[in-house]
Amino acid sequence: MNVQVAVLLVPLLYAAYALYAVARTVHAVRRFPECQHKDDDLPQLSVIVPACNEADTIEAALRTKLKAHYPKLELIVVNDRSTDETGAIAERVAAEDPRLKVVHVTELPTGWLGKLNALECGRAAATGEIILFSDADVNFGPELLRRSVSALMAQKLDFITVIAEMTSQSFLLDSSLTTFLRGLLIGGRIWNMRDPSSPIGVGAGVFNLVRRSALEKTPGFEWIKMEVADDIAFGQMMKKSGARCAVYNGAYDLHLAYYSSFPAFVRGLEKNSYAGSSYRPSIALLMLFILAYGELTAAALLPFASGVAMWMAAASLVLVAISQALVVSWVRRPMLTAVLPALGPLLVIFIAARAVLLIHLRGGISWRGTFYSLAQLRAGMRLERL
């Protein structure tokens, strides 16, 4: 076996597994079925929206939530110490619709991340039997709430999360998002979410729907109050508690514009791209090496390979491109991002390496106007690596 063949064996196996994982997820994670319940049979639903400096997007998103076809809806915006017009906008919309109320947070309790405290404040104010936690910039389709709550009831579930449609105006951002999502499908094994014997549990800040009774069986937000990857940790907490969990493809019902530009995206991921490696540089470097070796080796060697090695490199790239195409068609992402399979991994490696370096140089992260040291973040870690 020559050196090139030996070097390309792992990337080929990696690409084959990636295609398997993506295909299995696409097969297992379906769209919501049509609502199977009459309006009178649907329970009270409380939608909790934590918001900090979301003046540019919150009004449009709130109006889509209020237009959702759901008979017993309570919408709670938690204005988390915003310094822009977020609170005023939410109050103005609330004055037009009694289903919306606004909770203002003026001080952050010691030992809490701002978003987690906002989620807890919203939970405390909610009256619904079912509670939905959803980010402030997320837009709902008109049937999303009825379909999701009906699915929760019909399938006797306790917790549902979704994968949303994310749009952007940047090709670099789109390429990065496609790679991030494909990485979740490869490493997350979310096709096992429904299996009660599997430890796999995930969540998404865009949409975490839970029965109040199931949430009350967990340690609650107090337990994850310093967890930066709060949405995934929330899903893991629900699964650990014995909740019956599921994930759906919500790309046809749930939409958000994900950051205004690629530089904004890079800055936004400073706070959480390191969390997946427990803020340990050795783990982060290992994960970056695996990503680089698995995703980039074939593209780097193809121009110089010949014989069997050339075919192995080409096969690896084809398998990666097919898995990328499956992902983008599944969640309505631009197909162009599947054409250059090496671009997304390069960008993700840059984003993650930059975050690790900056966090260590600064000694921690700043989020919603508060600085948290690495020691605090490590002590508050609850996320189990996927």
Image (cartoon, rainbow, N blue to C red):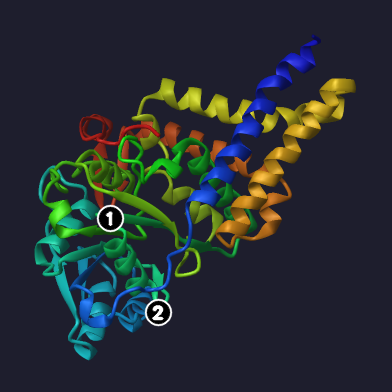
Q: Residues within 10 Å of mark 1 (few under 14, many from 20)?
A: some
Residue 186: give x, y in percent of width and height: 52, 38
Q: Nearer the viewer, residue 50 or 130?
A: 130
Quarter of the image where the C terminus is located: top left
Q: Amino acid at mark 2?
A: Pro
Q: Residue at x 65, y 26 (%)?
A: 13
Asked whether the viewer can see residue 253, the reply is yes
Q: Is residue 354 left or right of residue 179?
A: left
Confirm or deny contact between disc 2 and disc 1 (CB under 8 A). no
Please report whichever mark, 2 or 1, sits nearer to the chain's N-terminal start: 2
Give the label on residue 157, or none.
Answer: 1
Distance of label 2 from label 1 (alpha carbons):
22 Å
Residue 383 location, x and y as percent?
Answer: 30, 36
Q: What mark, if any, has residue 175 been given in the picture?
A: none
Crowd around label 2: few <14 · some 14–19 · many ≥20 (10 Å): some
Instruction: Give the vertical position of 242 relative to 178 (above or below).
Output: above
Comparing 221 with 318, the one in front is 318
The residue that disc 2 covers is: 142
What residue type is disc 1 on? Answer: Leu
Q: Secondary structure at mark 1?
A: loop
| Image coords of residue 87 (percent x, y) | 23, 74
Locate the N terminus by quadrant.
top right
Q: Residue placed at 15% from the left, 59% from the top?
A: 212
Asked which quadrant contains residue 308, the reply is top right
**At x 61% / y 29%, what residue is drawn?**
292
Q: Nearest the camera: 68 or 174?
A: 68
